[in-house]
Every structure is written in structure tokens, then in C-alpha cells.
Image: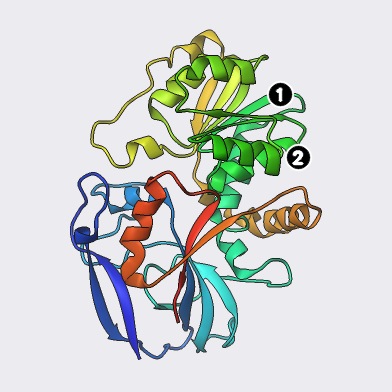
Amino acid sequence: MLNTQLRLARRPSGEAVTGDFHISREAVPDPAPGQVVVRAEYISIDPSVRTHLNAGQSYRSMVGIGEVVDVPVAGEVVASASPLFSTGDKVVGPLGTQEYAVSDGANLTKVDLALAPLPVWLGGLGLTGLTAYFGLLEIGKPQPGQTVVVTAASGAVGSVVGQIARIKGARAVGVCGSEEKCRWLTQELGFDAAVNYRSPDLYRDLKEATPDRIDVVFDNVGGPLLDTILRRLAMRGRIIICGATSQYNTADIYGPKNYMVLATLRARMEGFIIYDYEDRFDAVRREMAQWVKDGRLKLRENIVEGSIVDYPQMLHRLYEGENIGKMMMRIRP
């Protein structure tokens, strides 16, 4: 049995393209004692994967030249030499862009399908949903009646952020890239307002959507959009730096120009790493699963069919601006 793998061939310049990767095929090994072999069923497609293809250092290891591209995967244990996992168990973990992965189990989470279907464990109950939860509630700490603005609001993280804000009694305002997405946020997910960042008068629209200014900003985009939002910040506002999708495919990094409002308004801007909260993942997953069961939290997966060789094209589709919800690829059998 051969394992098809997507490996990094060179460091991308700008957006990653097919030529930045190469395909390898090798035999699937039997698991050594304590190990399992997992067959990938769904592979996560996230804009942040682009940042892991660069040279340098970050909170996690960058993908080395020749290495399998490291992304979250949901799949099934097909062989086990571990007392912790049985053949047939469904699991999620950072197993990479490959059909089969060997793991010692330390990075795997066993999935409870009674709690939610497998794709949800890669999305709303996976790292994206957990990122929304901990970033908003631990860093932003929105209070009832306060206004939360989230950028890339129709994406995997942003769509959950706004709904959690509403669950906690705050106003949720989403910023996204089309009128269709704005309608989805307000009509389907219950956001209080949504703003199209492509508007010819973005600041006017943002001002109308935030009459009491902005208490919490959950930013996934960065760049000039963040500068515009900072103009509406309230006294002692909190800006959560989660991502910067506008900066991932360019070497010309745009830093905030309106940052002095932080001093004037006694505000703060803070980043976070989701793995700082790993010891609370299980409890929060159960809490969020209950919200889903109660109809308070709606999760949407954008599932595309494909094979390992299709991953670069699928990643490109994510940057075309058409995605709504959590994008993932279902691996063809």
C-alpha cells in the first residue's frame, strides 16, 4: 500500500503555487510498538498554512524543504500497536498532507462521534473553533452590551467569534468581502450588523454599524482594514491579534499607522497562541457542542472533494474570497 504525500519543494514567494510542492509516494509502514497508522479522511485548508512555509522561526516549527506540509487532519486509525487506540477509532491531529500518517498518539485526539460528526471536529470543535473561543473570551473579555467587531467574519474562526459574542450578550459586527456574506452573517448566524470592506465608504458603514464605538476587535486580516477599525475604538478597547490574512502572501508588510490610539484610549492590542490553553480543550469542546445542540451556535463546513495532489489548488481557492465557513478537503477513497 502506497502513501501519497505533498512535500515542500521550495520556499514560496508570494502566494504558494503548485511548483512550490512535490508529490512523493512511499510504502505505508506497519506501526511500531506504541504507534498507530491513520488514514486521512478530511484535511484542513487554512490561510495560516502559508506562514508555516516561510524560513525563520515562530511559535511552531516551520515546514522544512522536503518535509510533508503540516496541517490538521481528521481520519481513522487503520492499524494500531498502541493500547490507547483501536482500529476504527476516529481521530484528529496535525498529521499533514498525506493519505496515511504514523503517529505515537501524543498529538492525536480521539473523536466522539456522538458529540459531533467527524468534519466538525476539524472545524467548529477543532482548532478554529477553539481559537475563536479562547481568543475572544480570554483576551477580549466582552461584557454584555459591548460591541465586538470581527474581521474575516464569514471564515472558519470569524463566524464562530461573532456567535460566541452574541451568546455572551455582546453585539456582534462582522466585516467581510461581499453582500452575500453580510446577509449570511446577519440572517443566518444572528450577527447584529455586517460591513462589506469593499464598500466605497468603509468608515461610514463601520460607523453606522458601531454607534457606540468598538469595545473588542477580533482581527484576522490586519493591514489597512485594521487601521480603519482602530478609528472607531472605544475607551479601554481590546484588540485581539489572531491572524493577518492580508499579509500572508506579500513581503511588503503593512504595520498599523493608527496605533497611537492605544495610548489615547488606554486600549491594548494582544496576540495569543491557541496551544496555551490546551489543557482546557476537552471541556470547551463539550461546552461548544452543547451550544450547537441547543441551536445557539451554527457551524458551516465548506467541504471540497479532492486528492493530496489537489491541495495547492484548494489552498488557492481559499484566497479567492469565495469561501464561507470552515474549508476542508475530503480525500477521495
Graded by Cα atoms within 10 Å as few (under 14), some (14 to 19) or many (20 or more), the crowding at tag 1 reads some
Quadrant holding the C terminus = bottom left
User: Which residue corresponds to the image point at 49% horizontal and 45% vertical from the top-left?
Assistant: 273
Mark 1: amino acid: Gln
Pick whichever of labels 2 and 1 is earlier in the sequence: 1
Q: Is residue 56 above or below residue 279?
A: above
Residue 291 in the image, given as x and y percentages of width and height = 76, 52
Q: Kindly identify which residue carries mark 1.
A: 146
Of 107 and 186, nearer the camera is 186
SS for tag 1? loop
Is residue 169 toward the left or the right of residue 299 in the image? right
Residue 167's disc is 2
Mark 2: amino acid: Ile
Residue 163 in the image, given as x and y percentages of width and height = 68, 41
User: Which residue corresponds to the image point at 37% horizontal and 35% vertical from the top-left?
Assistant: 246
Residue 15 in the image, given as x and y percentages of width and height = 27, 47
